[in-house]
Image: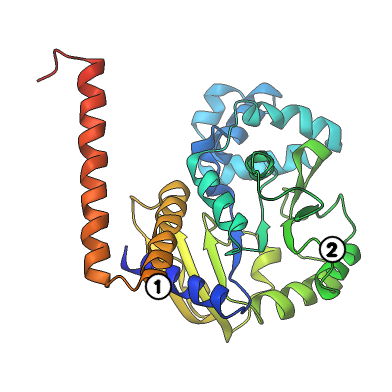
């Protein structure tokens, strides 16, 4: 929790001093709690439903073999056929409370740039519920493969409005553009790679959530002596990633996920706003937060008791 409070202070100071905010980088790990199947389950279902592998043979295959078989099968499908085979994994999706917290951070000006490797529309669904910001007027979503790379780059370099920009690096499900095979995610085109390397990774500080940097096109844009990175993931980063950034903070552990991180970060920023504007000492604010947490826990116990009065 200390690192989240530290990040909250830094984000607050950047906003108050009108400095560029952190860039948020989102991976597939953020969407599972919103009802989207994880990639392993999608692959297993695809292989069996399409008849590429029997259930008995699938049980004998390890993860690498399943991925290899999946890539071989899907690379020969059209964009429309890919969509129809994969969309079942997204049909029950609804934004989790982590997306609600993220939307508030965007509304309040703490985040204005997001890059994501996800194909889903969870962030859009959450933003559509906002009463403070509206698409096209306040934010715009770009998807590689749908929007041209040179157009996306021009929107950043010209500081074009809207100021809040969200870029889907690997396509968009509902647009039937799904970049997933190693060939499709092995390397960005030259101009986009230069932009991503020099104007994003080299020039901006980043918060990376739910992403293990498994895509080669993203890896290729990371070089030594980048700026700072907050890495948020249940598992720690690999040694290769540790070498890429001058300053890397790890928020990791089994209890770390997108929802808890985003809600804790939003709450920490709210506390920082109160502390700075009212001059409240840190210790008093921490005591207040502990009291609020205890009230929440007692309320949860009361709700459980009312649901089941016979519980001990």
**Which residue is at the far front?**
278
Q: Is residue 53 visible?
A: no
10 Å crowding of disc 2: few (<14), some (14-19), many (20+): some
Towards the viewer: 15 or 82:
15
Q: Compared to 136, does 242 lie above or below?
A: below
Reading the image, the residue beneath label 2 is 152
User: How was this image coloured?
Assistant: rainbow
Q: Which mark is residue 276?
A: 1
Q: Compared to 53, does 132 lie above or below?
A: below
Towards the viewer: 96 or 229:
96
Hey, which quadrant is residue 201 in on the image?
Answer: bottom right
**Residue at x 21% of width, y 15% of height:** 308
* Callout 2: SS: helix
Rounded to the nearest whole Å, what is the CA distance between mark 2 and mark 1? 37 Å
Hey, which quadrant is residue 95 in on the image?
Answer: top right
Counting from the top left corner in percent of width and height, residue 138 is at: 75, 56
Counting from the top left corner in percent of width and height, residue 128 is at: 69, 40
Query: How many badges with numbers are in the image?
Result: 2
* Callout 1: SS: helix
Q: Quadrant of the C terminus?
A: top left
**Which residue is at the far top?**
310
**Is residue 236 found left or right of 193 in the rendered image?**
left
Mark 2 or 1 closer to N-term?
2
Q: Quadrant of the N terminus?
A: bottom left
């Amino acid at each position: 929790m200390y690192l989240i409070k530290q990040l909250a202070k830094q984000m607050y100071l950047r906003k108050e001093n009108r400095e560029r905010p952190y860039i948020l980088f989102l991976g597939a790990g953020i969407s599972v709690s919103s009802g989207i199947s994880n990639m392993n389950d999608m692959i297993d279902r695809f292989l069996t439903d399409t008849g590429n592998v029997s259930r008995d043979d699938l049980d004998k295959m390890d993860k690498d073999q399943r991925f290899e078989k999946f890539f071989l099968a899907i690379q020969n499908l059209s964009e429309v056929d890919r969509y129809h085979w994969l969309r079942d994994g997204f049909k029950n999706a609804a934004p989790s409370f982590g997306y609600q917290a993220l939307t508030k951070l965007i509304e309040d000006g703490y985040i204005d740039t997001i890059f994501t490797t996800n194909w889903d529309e969870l962030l859009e669904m959450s933003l559509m519920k906002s009463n403070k910001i509206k698409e096209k007027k306040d934010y715009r979503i770009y998807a590689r493969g749908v929007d041209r790379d040179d157009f996306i780059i021009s929107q950043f370099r010209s500081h074009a409005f809207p100021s809040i920009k969200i870029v889907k690096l690997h396509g968009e499900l509902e647009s039937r553009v799904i970049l997933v095979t190693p060939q499709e995610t092995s390397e960005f085109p030259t101009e986009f790679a230069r932009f991503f390397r020099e104007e994003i990774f080299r020039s901006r500080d980043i918060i990376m959530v739910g992403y293990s940097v498994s895509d080669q096109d993203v890896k290729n844009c990371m070089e030594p002596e980048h700026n700072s990175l907050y890495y948020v993931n249940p598992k720690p980063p690999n040694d290769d990633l540790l070498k890429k950034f001058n300053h890397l903070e790890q928020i990791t552990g089994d209890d770390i996920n997108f929802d808890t991180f985003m809600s804790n970060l939003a709450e920490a920023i709210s506390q920082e706003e109160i502390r700075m504007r009212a001059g409240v000492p840190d210790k008093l604010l921490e005591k207040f937060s502990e009291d609020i947490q205890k009230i929440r826990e007692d309320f949860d116990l009361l709700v459980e008791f009312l649901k089941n009065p016979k519980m001990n």
